């Protein structure tokens, strides 16, 4: 049995992104994410709010319904006594960009049964994977979505998730042709999401979602001068995400 963080929670931590080959490039940044039950999405106005339409629920006002709809297309369901938690960037000061939103299906005893990874790219497209994690929170899934303009849509992701009362994290490593290409991760410590705590976090990391967008574009410009761009084909979102 696993103890969950107090919900809703503010998870303050760091993002690490390491491109290993053909050139080595690392990005590290302080940030914070929100962790909440999808049936109790917090709203703190301009400081931040979790809106279903920003995430896995286009066309519906219920994030639980959106996640359950996508899970059903993958042969999964959500039992009445199971909880769905979301770890995400909130919309703050009118802007949101969430490269990765993570949904945890948690059983009554606190075990993570499956995870949905919702990926957004800078072209305004989205994709999602449902993965069954093992007892260590690990899984492997095929890459199916054009995320980086410098990488082809092939290979596999090694995924690891962590959901404890003292530590929350998600990491993804991409392998292509047996070579580890890049690692991306977020790890942070959860605390109760209060307005005072959120204000402190916003002052420490101002305009956090704007920073996310700016860092990704700056990272892309840096690589554009060193790597060839891979042609991108228009993406059709998977069933349950349209």
Image (cartoon, helix red, strand yellow):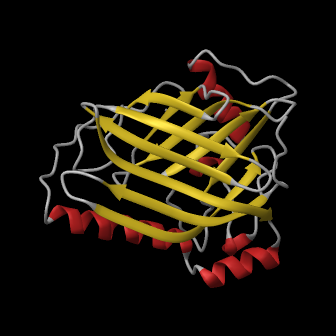
Residue drawn 72% across the image and 36% down it: 64
Report which quarter residue 152 is drawn in.
top left
Residue 195, image x, y percentages = 80, 74
As drawn, is 197 to the left or to the right of 181? right
In the depicted structure, whether residue 67 falls above or below residue 20:
above
As rendered, which of 203 and 233 lies closer to the eye?
203
Residue 181, image x, y percentages = 30, 45
Quadrant for the N terminus in the image: top right
As rendered, which of 127 and 103 lies closer to the eye?
103
Visible residue check, residue 142: yes
In the depicted structure, whether residue 122 falls above or below residue 114:
below
Residue 60, image x, y percentages = 65, 39
As drawn, is 222 to the left or to the right of 92? left
Report which quarter residue 174 is drawn in.
top left
Residue drawn 62% across the image and 51% down it: 169
Residue drawn 60% across the image and 44% down it: 102
In the depicted structure, whether residue 169 falls above or below residue 77:
below
As drawn, is 102 to the left or to the right of 150? right
Farthest bottom residue in view: 203
Visible residue check, residue 58: no
């Amino acid at each position: 049995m696993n103890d969950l963080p107090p919900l809703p929670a503010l998870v303050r931590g760091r993002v690490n992104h390491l491109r290993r080959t053909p050139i080595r490039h690392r990005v590290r940044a302080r940030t914070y994410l929100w962790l909440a039950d999808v049936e109790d999405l917090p709203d703190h106005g301009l400081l931040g709010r979790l809106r279903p339409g920003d995430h896995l629920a286009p066309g519906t006002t219920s994030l639980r319904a959106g996640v359950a709809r996508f899970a059903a297309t993958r042969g999964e369901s959500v039992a009445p006594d199971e909880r769905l938690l979301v770890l995400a960037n909130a919309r703050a000061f009118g802007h949101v960009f969430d490269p990765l939103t993570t949904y945890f299906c948690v059983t009554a005893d606190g075990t993570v049964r499956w995870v949905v990874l919702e990926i957004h790219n800078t072209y305004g497209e989205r994709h999602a994977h449902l993965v069954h994690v093992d007892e260590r929170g690990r899984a492997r899934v095929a890459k199916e979505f054009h995320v980086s303009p410098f990488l082809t849509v092939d290979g596999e992701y090694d995924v690891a998730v962590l959901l404890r009362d003292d530590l929350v994290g998600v990491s993804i490593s991409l392998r292509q042709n047996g070579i580890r290409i890049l690692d991306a991760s977020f790890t942070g410590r959860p605390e109760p999401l209060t307005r005072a705590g959120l204000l402190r976090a916003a002052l420490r990391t101002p305009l956090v979602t704007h920073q996310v967008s700016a860092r990704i574009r700056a990272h892309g410009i840096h690589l554009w001068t060193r790597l060839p761009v891979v042609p991108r084909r228009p993406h059709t979102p998977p069933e349950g995400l349209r």
